[in-house]
Image (tube, grey):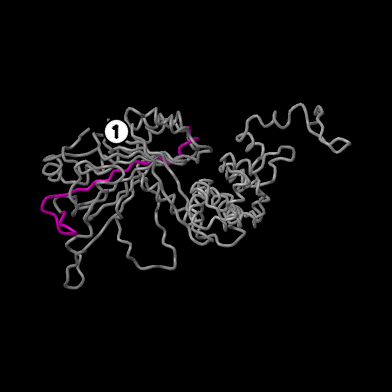
Amino acid sequence: MTIAPFIDNDETSTVTSVAADEVRTRTIADLADDAGFLNSRVWLHHQDAAQLHGETTQLHTGTLRELLRTRSGELAAEPLVELLAMLADEGFAWRDVARLVGVSVPALRKWRQGEAATGENRLKVASLVALCEVLRDKALQSDPASWLELPMLEDVPVTGLDLYAANRIDLLFRRALHFDADPETILDEFDPSWRSTYRGAFEVFEAEDGLPGIRLRDSDG
Amino acid sequence: MTVYPHAPLALVALEVRFPPLAEPYDSAGLRRALKAKLPIPETATHETVTFGGPAPLIERREFPRLMSRDRTTALVITDEALVLETTTYDGYEEHRKLIEEAVTAAAQIVKPDGITRVGMRYIDEIRVPGVAEAPGDWSGWIVDGLLVPLAPDLHVGTESFKPTSWQGTATYDVGPGAAVKLRYGPQVGNAVPPQGSTRRKAAPDPGLFFLLDSDGAWTPEDEVPEFTPEAILVACDLVHEPLSALFKAVGTPRLINDVFNDAGGQP
């Protein structure tokens, strides 16, 4: 419930700040207005790259998801061949693109040669392009494709591509924005059994002949 | 406690502020706890659009809102405040029961770490038949103490100056950590929109009215107390008493008899 302004604010400006008692019991509408004003004021004050870097870590992942959704819709209007060329320029392997879009590599090859795709698949390709834009612009990842291929932990082969493929954009953005985000916490949310899966009693190693072998993990595992 | 038939009360709001929550609360549990009185869930969304980067940045904040079926009562709990507001008021004793129910649910489910402020605000739109042209001649209806800007002896030279608009504020200390702030004066339209997020039943037509915006608040002076229903209700009682007394002192007996009781009253 918004309370109509009691005072007509047509008043002479002053250089000296005039103290105003802003402490009042707020209504529901006041709560929303205060939050929006505070956010707007904070963002308008921050313009340089260093401050933007710090502030991107404070972005709510929901905000990035909204950006991703909006930008995906815009990019979906672009020719599919051009969208795929953008992904190639980003450095994606076609097998990864095929996996993330949910099609075969041959199907992807046909699209690259000009064949049409369904609207749903076009949007998926556009979403991947949009993801790179958002990661680069808002999460300061200069090479999004390479970053997405990085494993969460050295001995755990779960990557950002896996998070994206599983539609866990929330975890992906958390990892991207919050540089102090604990990878194990993110893995716990992604796959609670990851420890037994990737850090079980056995481990894969490269044997003397160059081929992979399996052995019991040692106690320092 | 007097409840006048034609009360000028437009809105009552309770706000309890607390330290920012460390994590989201169980909104589904809150909804279950208050289903009897506030069964209608909604979401209040506020978007902030920020320009300055390569693309507009849209930030959306959502607040769960629980409403009564007739949409005249609403509760919102954010990560730093609880607000309970209503446009239907059957006297403080009845309203206190709703407050108790809301803050008890909040204590059990939201579990704030303390209380940093308790405020109660009453918004009255006093309309008097025949007083329709701004700023209005309220003498005889509102006590003279609130009509100072219209004092007839305000002269400059031979001219008698009358304001075209005016307002007043007064703050009263009413106890340890407690104060009441009164904003008053003529206004045109509605102070509280009839079809806002909290609906007003039988809202008056927009026009000239005398606003009483009474805001009583208590803030802890020493340590931050625990968030308990008992502590909140004590604070509500503490500020309600002077709010009620102030309301009764503002109107003349004529206002009460001819307007409120030809109708009604308030706290």
Q: Is residue B123 magenta?
A: yes
Residue A53 visible in the shown view: no
Residue B3 x, y percent position in the rendering: 20, 35
The C terminus of chain A lies in quadrant: top right
* Amino acid type at mark 1: His
Query: What residue is shown at x 58% (from left), y 43% (from top)?
Result: A103
Lateral position of residue A142 relative to residue B215, left or right: right
**In the figure, B16 relative to A117: above or below?**
above
Q: Position of residue B251 (x, y in %)?
A: 19, 46
Residues B6 and A62: in front is A62
Q: Position of residue A108 (x, y in %)?
A: 60, 49
Position of A78 compared to B119: left or right?
right
In front: A160, or A129? A129
Q: Residue at the bottom extreme?
A: B157
Q: Main secondary structure of the magenta part?
A: loop
Q: Which residue is mark 1?
A: B95
Q: Which residues are magenta?
A: B111-138
**Residue B197 can be seen, yes or no:** yes
Q: Tell me if residue B148 is in the magenta stretch.
A: no
